[in-house]
């Protein structure tokens, strides 16, 4: 059988290069697109043996959303009948679909083999795995985006958008870690999950994100509908596969991210998990950078307030104290002086708290302009 294939490869002008090429080389029938031959590199990329591959058609090797683009390229080659093995047209970018549902970024080009419109008319499809380059370029792009963001909210939006796109997921959620509650709180959700009912808090061990927090490592759940830890919202929207990672910086847990797919047969792999961990690590570092910048600003404001108010408050406290114990004051005025003293002392204590800020903990009192610092928690 292998000898026959060698003979056929030579008859098509391919020779030994067909078998030794590091690129996946696939010979398909021009009409019908059934696979006739493929080399060892094709087997390594897609996971099918040569025997299994010959029962497939070429479109079965790409996910459904990418098949129209593949058909367009095949039709273009058939229409031109070009023989372009030595001078092929620029490849197109596609996604491959492996035997077990794994996906990979590829470049694909097509050339005509043999006499057109004959029974022997074949197409040579050249497929190159470019996933490493795509991941590298994406990480550089994300790092640059994080570097220019000055708002934590924007960092998380970038993280979610890039993670969903890079892992070819359908939806995603970013969670904040609530230290007091000991739980994850969803803060950023892709449009498809908005207005869906789900738990307000995700505990460690719950769902893929909760498992990632519990293990402090990326987690893959490729059979989400059957997973015992799955949360209701994930089951209700038909999630099939999820990969999640914690947002960690020097051992400090900031939150988590999870992205998922609704496609039957979609499987995330160890490369996806590693990539999400890198993205979440970059985001965590960016968040810490934003937090430190904000903290430095808050400390500067606190020092300015302390410098400006300390002497003024010292005078106010001193005079209020003298008035509150002056026997010449009527009782009703003495009570008012005591209240003024108490207010001045509380203001002085607030200024002292400003000097002891070590982190930024915010609360919303419903005041114009948004949230304010929770001083007791921020200086604890």
Image (cartoon, rainbow, N blue to C red):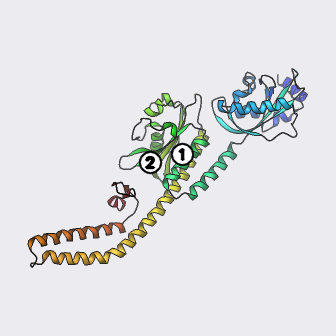
The crowd level at tag 2 (other Cα within 10 Å; few <14, some 14-19, many 20+) is some
At horizontal 36% and vertical 75% (from top left) the residue drawn is 307
Residue 136 versus residue 262 in the image, above or below: below
Q: Position of residue 234 (x, y in %)?
A: 47, 33
Instruction: Please give left or right for residue 67 compared with residue 272 in the image.
Output: right
Mark carried by residue 100: none
Tell which tag, 2 or 1, sits nearer the viewer.
Answer: 1
Answer yes or no: is residue 171 visible.
yes
User: In terms of image quadrants, where is residue 48?
Assistant: top right
Q: Position of residue 99 (x, y in %)?
A: 66, 28
Which of the marked residues, 2 or 1, is nearer the chain's N terminus? Answer: 1
Instruction: Please give left or right for residue 69 compared with residue 141 in the image.
Output: right
Q: Which residue is mark 2?
A: 176
Q: Which residue is mark 1?
A: 160
Label 2, label 1: how far apart the Cα atoms are: 13 Å
At horizontal 39% and vertical 73% (from top left) the residue drawn is 304
At horizontal 45% and vertical 30% (from top left) the residue drawn is 228
Residue 157 versus residue 19 in the image, above or below: below
User: In terms of image quadrants, where is residue 69?
Assistant: top right
Q: Position of residue 311 (x, y in %)?
A: 31, 78
């Amino acid at each position: 059988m292998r000898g026959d294939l060698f003979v056929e490869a030579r008859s098509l002008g391919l020779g030994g290069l067909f078998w030794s090429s590091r690129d996946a080389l696939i010979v398909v029938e021009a009409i019908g697109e059934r696979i006739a031959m493929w080399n060892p590199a094709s087997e390594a990329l897609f996971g099918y043996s040569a025997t299994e591959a010959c029962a497939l058609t070429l479109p079965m090797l790409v996910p459904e959303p990418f098949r129209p683009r593949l058909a367009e390229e095949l039709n273009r080659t058939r229409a031109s009948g070009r023989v372009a093995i030595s001078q092929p047209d620029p490849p197109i970018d596609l996604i491959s679909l492996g035997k077990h549902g794994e996906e990979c970024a590829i470049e694909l080009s097509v050339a005509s083999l043999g006499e057109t419109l004959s029974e022997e008319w074949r197409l040579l499809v050249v497929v190159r795995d470019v996933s490493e380059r795509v991941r590298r370029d994406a990480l550089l792009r994300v790092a640059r985006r994080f570097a220019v963001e000055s708002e934590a909210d924007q960092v998380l939006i970038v993280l979610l958008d890039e993670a969903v796109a890079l892992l070819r997921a359908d939806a995603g959620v970013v969670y904040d870690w609530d230290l007091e509650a000991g739980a994850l709180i969803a803060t950023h959700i892709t449009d498809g999950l908005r207005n869906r009912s789900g738990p307000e808090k995700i505990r460690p061990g719950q769902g893929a994100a909760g498992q990632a927090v519990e293990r402090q490592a990326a987690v893959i759940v490729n059979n989400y509908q059957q997973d015992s830890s799955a949360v209701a919202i994930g089951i209700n929207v038909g999630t099939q596969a999820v990969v999640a990672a914690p947002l960690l910086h020097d051992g400090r847990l900031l939150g988590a991210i999870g992205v998922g797919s609704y496609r039957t047969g979609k499987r995330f792999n160890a490369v996806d998990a590693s990539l999400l961990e890198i993205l979440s690590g970059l985001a965590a570092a960016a968040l810490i950078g934003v937090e430190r910048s904000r903290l430095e600003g808050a400390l500067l404001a606190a020092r300015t307030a302390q410098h400006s108010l300390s002497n003024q408050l010292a005078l106010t406290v001193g005079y209020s104290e003298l008035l509150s114990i002056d026997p010449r004051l009527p009782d009703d005025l003495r009570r008012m002086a005591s209240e003024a003293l108490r207010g001045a002392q509380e203001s002085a204590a607030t200024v002292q708290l400003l000097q002891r800020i070590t982190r930024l903990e915010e609360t919303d009192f419903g005041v114009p302009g948004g949230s304010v610092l929770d001083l007791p928690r921020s200086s604890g």
